[in-house]
Image: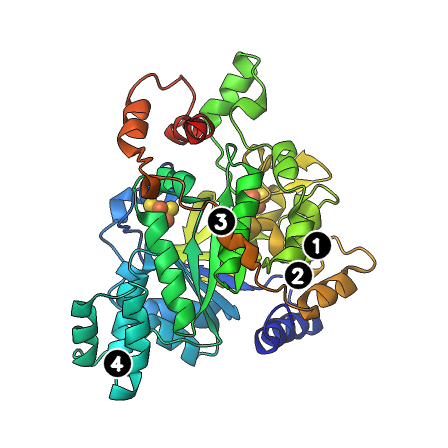
Amino acid sequence: MRFPLALTAKIARHIIKHKTLRTPKFALVLQLEPLHTCNLTCTGCGRIREYSTSLKDMMTLEDCLASARECEAPMVSICGGEPLIYPKIEELVAGLLQQGRIVYVCTNGMFMRKKMKDYLASIYTPAMEATLSRLLAENLISTKDAEAIRKGKQDGRPAIKPSKWMYWNVHIDGLEYTHDLIVEREGVFKECVEAVRMAKMLGYQVATNTTVYKETDAKEIEQMFEFFSSLEVDGHTISPGYEYDAAKKDMVKRLNKQPEDFFLTRKMTREKFAKIQEWGERFTIFGTPVYQEFLAGKRELTCTAWAIPTRNIKGWKAPCYLMTDGHYARYQEMLEKVDWNKYGVVNGIARDARCENCMVHCGYDPSGALGTNYQRGDNWKNIKYNFGPKPRPYYEGRKVNAFNGFSVGKGHLAEAKAAINTGVAAGNSQRDELLAKIAAKKEG
Ligand code: SF4
Ligand code: SF4
C-alpha cells in the first residue's frame, strides 16, 4: 500500500464523519507554529520576517495541545520557525501522539541527529552496541556521542521515538548546491542527508518537504526524488511556493512587464509540475491525485484553506498559511468570521488579487481530499492511489550527483552573499536575485 493503512483509515474516518454530519468546514491538518525562532535565515523565508517581532515568543505546551483538540484535525504538522528549537518539543510530540494524531515534525534537519541521539540514550542497553557500532562506522555519531548515549538519558524528559504515527518531514529544496544556497548556509544539505540516513537506520518514518520556486529546475527536483528514494525515505511533500508582492504587481502594470518576470504564475507552476503524476507513480508523493491533476493544469479546484488552518503565537491565522488578514482566538471563531468567499480563484477569476497565482498545497490539496469540485471517478482515483502499491526505492538514485556544492569544493555562499549586496534590480527580491544565480553557477 502506498500509505500506511492505519493512517489512511484515520483520515478517511474523519472525512466520512464530517460529511455524514454535514459539517460545512472542518480541519484536516493543523499547521502548528509553536515558535518562529529559527537557527537558519533562509532567503525570503516569510516566517522569520513576518513574525520578526515575536521571535522570542512561543506558545505554551498547553496552548499547543489545546489547539489540536480544538480543531480536531487528525494530522498535525509542527512547523515554525524550527520546531526542534521549541524547548518542549518532546512533550509536544508525545502529547499529540497521545491524542491520537498523525504528527509531522517539519524541520530543517540541523538538530535531528541530536534528538535521535537523545532517543538512543533514553533506551540504551548493552544490547544496542551493534547499532552504535553501525552508526559509528557510518560516521553518523562520534565516539564522544556513543559515550554520552551509554550514560543514558539524564533529564527525565521524554524523547522523540520512532512511531508509525510520526514522520520527520525534512525541508529539502534541491540538491546540495541549490539547497545550501536557499538556506544560506553551506553544509545544511549534507547534514540533512546524514540525519535522514540515521533516522532510517533507527526505524523512523521520514519524508522530504520541497517548495518549488520560480527558478527551480524541475529536472533537479526529479533527481532529488531519485536520490532520496534511494535512501528509502517514506514519502515526499511538494508544493509550489508563492509570495504575493503588491510592489511587483505594480511593476507589471506600470512597466508593462510580464508577470513571469516577478511571480511564479499559475502557467509556470503547471509547466514545472507537468510531470507530477509521473512522479506520483515513481515516488511516494503525498497529496491526492486530484491535487496532482490541478498542479499539472488538467483541472481547476477552489481553495479550501480553512481545512489546513495555521495556529501560532498570535492565534488562528486567517485566511491561510501564506496571507494574514487577521488572527482569531478560536478556530470556530475564525471559521465563522472570515468571509471565505472573498478568497481563492474560481473559474480562472481571482476573488482576491493576492490569490491570483496561488496553487499551494495548504489551499488546494484538501480540496482534492474533500471532494470540492468533485468530478466523476475522483473517489476511485484517490482510493486507487492510496491503496495502490508503494513505489519501490529507486536505488539507481545513488548515482545522482547530489553533493554538487560545497562537498566538492564548490562553496558559493560568500559569492552569493556578495551578489545580493550589489546590483539588486529594482523590484526583484533577494530570493529572486539569489536563485537567479543558481543556473549559471551550477554550470560553472
Ligand atoms: S528553516 Fe524554515 S523557518 Fe527557518 S529560516 Fe528556513 S524556511 Fe524559515
Ligand atoms: S488561494 Fe487560498 S491558500 Fe492561496 S493565498 Fe488565497 S486564500 Fe491563501
Residue type highlighted by circle 2? Ala
Relative to 144, residue 376 above or below:
above
Cα–Cα gap, marks 2 and 3: 20 Å
Question: In x, y percent, where is residue 123?
Answer: 28, 83
Few, some or many residues within 10 Å of mark 3 (<14, 14–19, 20+) = many
Horizontal arrangement in the rendering, residue 277 relative to residue 10 (left or right): right
Few, some or many residues within 10 Å of mark 2 (<14, 14–19, 20+) = many
Of 5 and 44, the residue lying toward us = 5
Residue type highlighted by circle 1? Val
Relative to 405, residue 20 above or below:
below
Q: Mark yes or no: residue 309 visible.
A: no
Horizontal arrangement in the rendering, residue 21 relative to residue 216 (left or right): right
Residue behind mark 1: 290
In the image, which disc is placed on residue 210? 3
Of 212 and 58, the residue lying toward us = 212
Question: In x, y percent, where is residue 14?
Answer: 61, 73
Residue behind mark 4: 122
| Lower sequence index among marks 1 and 3 | 3
At horizontal 33% and vertical 35% (from top left) the residue drawn is 410
User: Answer yes or no: do the residues labelled 1 and 2 have beta carbons within 8 Å?
Assistant: yes
Horizontal arrangement in the rendering, residue 11 relative to residue 148 (left or right): right
Residue type highlighted by circle 4? Ser
Residue at disc 3, secondary structure:
strand
Q: Nearer the viewer, mark 1 or mark 3?
A: 3
Residue 272 picture quarter: top right
Residue behind mark 2: 369
